[in-house]
Image (spheres, grey):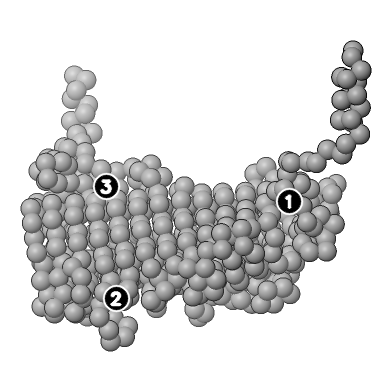
Amino acid sequence: MSKRCLYLIVLFLAVPVVAVWAQTVTAGSGGDFTTLAAAITSFRTGGTNAGNTATNVINCLDASYDEQLPQIDVQLTINGASGKSTVLLQQSSDGDGNDGLALDLPADAVVEFNDLILIPSATSTASDDLIDVVDGLANSVITFNDCIISSNYSGAPANTDGFTAPVGTATARVGDNGLNIITASDGLTVNISGTIIVDAAGPPAATADNILCTGGGAKTINITDGSIISYAQRLNFQHNGGTLNITGTHDSPIYLIKAQGTGYGHGIGIWLTRAFAVNLTYCIIADNTLNGVSIQSDGKTVTMNHVIIANNGDVGLEVIHVTPASWDTVITAENTTISGNAIDAVSPDTKDQVTLPDEMVNTSVFTGCIVASGDNGFNIAANSTATAAYSALVMAGANALGAKKTGDGTLIESSVITSDPQFTETSNFLSTTYFDVYNPAYGAAYNGSPLSGGGDYMGVMPLSVGQEWTLYW
């Protein structure tokens, strides 16, 4: 070996190596920290791991933690153990002092929660929100991956699938919202991916929602990867600030279902002037006790594509006035089915699928949509206009409307058909045939392409069991 090579080896060994990988600790029995709270504290200012420039990671070792957690105000990733770790959140003294977990992020900080079940502790239940995003400065990001956020049913979430009705009374329920995003600063992004938020809010007497997004800051909320928001005691989602993107796929839609409130049991409320663009793609908004989608009529841009709004207790899609102004909300719906809403409502009002108030400045546009099963397809007040193009306003068969339109406003129709779409499944939102279209008349009704609304076009009614058996004789 040459002296030069030997010198280089010695020099390499003598120089400290600066790690570029994540700083990772464990929390739980036999770990670096016995509690999750201590592990989080170690990364905060003054902690033993503070100042690390690489990714801060906590790997949970235990199946369950029942703790008061400190406020998270640094970059951090928390990973649950295999099969998810349950974190029972005691009321924290940080943040507002009455939430289960507070997050207050500096600029550019990224926080991830992976494979966690987050529920309130019965030991010291938060009197306000379960999770409170106090603030997030520019380019900060909070992500929930494959998590469950819920009330506490004897140490477990209301359910682990988002669909099953909660059984019994919650052992611990927070006083207000499940996830409260109330940032005043601009630039925060919240990602909710493959996550179930089920019966996470406070009692019905409270103004509590599964998710509340508000505050003056311009923020972005992304809900993706088959997430489910269900069984809220009020609204499943109340969106009052920033941009909201709810983006499912054909095989993995986003569900906003089964909100239970009697005063505000909506699938989603898009309210206040701070709510800017809302984009709904491949969503199922169904079986909520009141409106499927409720929109205040000032300053909103709402787009829907491949959406099913069905079987909600009141109006499927409702726009409402709140203050005298120019009603400049913009609604654009494409490939959307609105059907069966308000059929069972006990109300003197007519059972409308779409309701638009008076004097809306912009025309509401419905293209490739199916509106069915109700007293009226549209209830349009004076001086407002909606267009329906390459769509179906069903006036025949089992899914017929009483009328295409009521009210003094204008409905402009272009290439609209009225025949029955021949849905075979209209009640089970988990069915792969939910609101699929079987009428061949729909095969070229969307400008030469199939018209299927939010479902699929199947072409012909499937053979009955008896007919199928004849194929083998």
In this orientation, which residue lies closer to the viewer: 410 or 75? 75
Say which element carries label 3: loop
Report x, y in % for residue 343. 24, 67
Say which element carries label 1: loop
Q: How far apart are marks 1 and 3 (CA)?
A: 48 Å
Mark earlier in primary sequence (1, 3)? 1
Front: mark 1 or 3: 1
As shown in the figure, which amino acid type bears the numbered disc 1? Thr
For disc 3, the marked residue is 455
Report x, y in % for residue 183. 55, 71
Judge left or right: residue 54 versus residue 169. right
- Furthest-bottom residue in this view: 324
For disc 1, the marked residue is 53
Judge left or right: residue 299 versus residue 130. left
Q: Distance between the residues labelled 3 and 2?
A: 28 Å
As shown in the figure, which amino acid type bears the numbered disc 3? Gly
Mark earlier in primary sequence (1, 2)? 1
In this orientation, which residue lies closer to the viewer: 263 or 106? 106
In this orientation, which residue lies closer to the viewer: 3 or 350? 3
As shown in the figure, which amino acid type bears the numbered disc 2? Ser
Q: Do the residues labelled 3 and 2 touch (CB within 8 Å)?
A: no
For disc 2, the marked residue is 297
Front: mark 1 or 2: 1
Label 3: how many Cα within 10 Å (few below 14, some 14–19, many 20+): many
Label 2: how many Cα within 10 Å (few below 14, some 14–19, many 20+): many
Mark earlier in primary sequence (3, 2)? 2
Please identify the quadrant where the N terminus is shown. Answer: top right
For image coordinates 37% across by 62% down, the residue present is 278
Say which element carries label 2: loop
